[in-house]
Amino acid sequence: MRSRKTIAVLLVGALSWSLLANVAAQSKKKTSPSKPTVALEDEEYAVYSALIQSLYLSGAKVLVIDNFVAGCVPVGDNAEGERAWQQSLDKLPSKLPKLTPKTIADFKSKTRTCRTVEAKLTLPTKYILISQTERRAIFSKPDVNKSWQSFRQKYPGANGYINVSNIGFNEDRTQALVDTFRKCGDKCGGERMVLLTKVNGKWSVSATHKIWEL
């Protein structure tokens, strides 16, 4: 039979190991990096500016734009939703015939990268960048109509809010693909895949494919 001293030593050793393991786990949890955010380039702001001017400028007194790109979190935050999204991308070339394989491949590779949109857009109309936290706070009310009423009181003259995705480019960056949507009410809004081309140093929308519209 082991002596009381031996048992005590074993117990202290076990407790020490447990404490060390717990401290290590806590340290790892604290130092674990959050999902990285990659800065947008000037070329990407030029693409966004051209897209917004083409699709959303008409009649707008002020534009409210999400300051985060769409798609950072997988669609539906589950494997099934993500698979459905990828399948819809595979069908895009038939909807946008001029879309090159490189552009769609680049778009897919960037889809889940978290990025922040800064006030670097070139637009002739005043625009306001809204954070995910701010948007959630406005639309947290159970009554959707009251949420939209709050939105319009806070942003008078805005026709809803706009969101853009990461951009897929071809090899020489003369073609760009963006997923964008605008929500303007409980039964108002739409989402489109937008193809842009760069000619003589200027970006313009060349084709769009409607995903949904209310």
Image (cartoon, grey):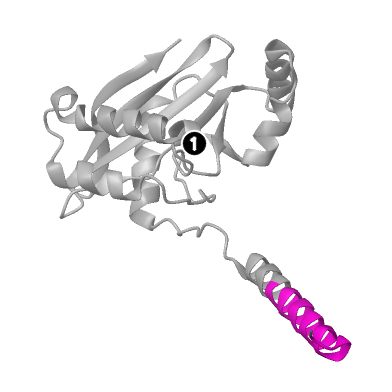
Q: Quadrant of residue 150?
A: top right
Q: Quadrant of residue 56?
A: top left
**Residue type highlighted by circle 1:** Asp
Residue toward you, 210 or 120? 210
Which residue is at a point 68% across and 74% down the rendered structure image? 21
Which residue is at a point 57% across and 59% down the rendered structure image? 34
Q: Which residue is under mark 1?
A: 77
How many other residues sit within 10 Å of disc 1, few (<14), some (14-19) or many (≥20)? few
Which residue is at a point 50% across and 30% down the rendered structure image? 162
Residue 206 showing in the rendered view: yes
Count of numbered circles in the view: 1
Height in image: 62 above or below 35? above
Residue toward you, 59 or 94? 94
Height in image: 59 above or below 1? above
Which residue is at a point 25% across and 42% down the rendered structure image? 176
Residue 199 showing in the rendered view: no
Quadrant assignment for the N terminus? bottom right
Q: Does residue 7 belong to the magenta stretch?
A: yes
Residue toward you, 61 or 70? 70
Q: Position of residue 195 (x, y in %)?
A: 24, 34
Query: Magenta part mainly helix, strand or loop?
Result: helix
Q: Does residue 146 belong to the magenta stretch?
A: no
Q: Position of residue 65 (x, y in %)?
A: 54, 36
Q: Is residue 69 left or right of residue 132?
A: left
Q: Position of residue 64 (x, y in %)?
A: 58, 32
Q: For the residue labelled by badge 1, is the local secondary structure a helix, a strand or a loop? A: helix
Q: Which residues are magenta?
A: 2-21
